[in-house]
Amino acid sequence: MHGDGFSFAAPGSWTVTRTGTTVAASHGGDTVSVTTFRLTKPYRAQLWKQAVTELDQVAAKLAAELKGTVVASRTVKVGSSTARQYDLAFTKDGEQLVERITFVLLGRREYELLCRYEAGKDEPACSQLLASFRPA
């Protein structure tokens, strides 16, 4: 799948939607997506500590909006980029869900890689999203 400035792979049988700066693929309640945002100032590796502090706050706010909690946070590699990843746990329509959000910062772009799946269930599409994501 291709979006404005990125590509990624998702299971071929999933339904693909494109809206503005987001490309998503879904099947049942499972979803993977990539959304892009333009940063006001270019990101540089020297800003990593400040970026982590800000992203921690963003993740906490997103969890609160979902009426959930941040259950994990970690620094990961996505391609050759250092990225920040969060697992948010929440309940929707009586179902326990996890939303894994990975923030990749490159120059003036922020890529938000999202994977939503049922809690306690292994979701290979999440691994596929991270392994296949390529900025343009």
Image (cartoon, helix red, strand yellow):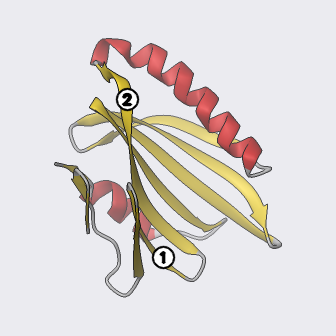
Furthest toward the left, the residue is 136
Looking at the picture, how far across and down is residue 30, in whole percent?
A: 55, 73
Q: Report the mark closest to the observer, 1 or 2.
A: 2
Image: 12 above or below 32: below
Residue at image position (31%, 11%) is 46
What SS does tag 1 mark?
A: strand
Furthest toward the top, the residue is 46
Furthest toward the front, the residue is 20
What SS does tag 2 mark?
A: strand
The N terminus: image quadrant: bottom left
The residue to which callout 2 is attached is 39
Question: Along the horizontal axis of the image, is 85 left or right of 18?
Answer: right
Answer whether labels 1 and 2 touch (C-beta < 8 Å).
Answer: no
The residue to which callout 1 is attached is 26
Q: Which amino acid type is shown beneath numbered disc 1?
A: Ser
Q: Which amino acid type is shown beneath numbered disc 2?
A: Leu
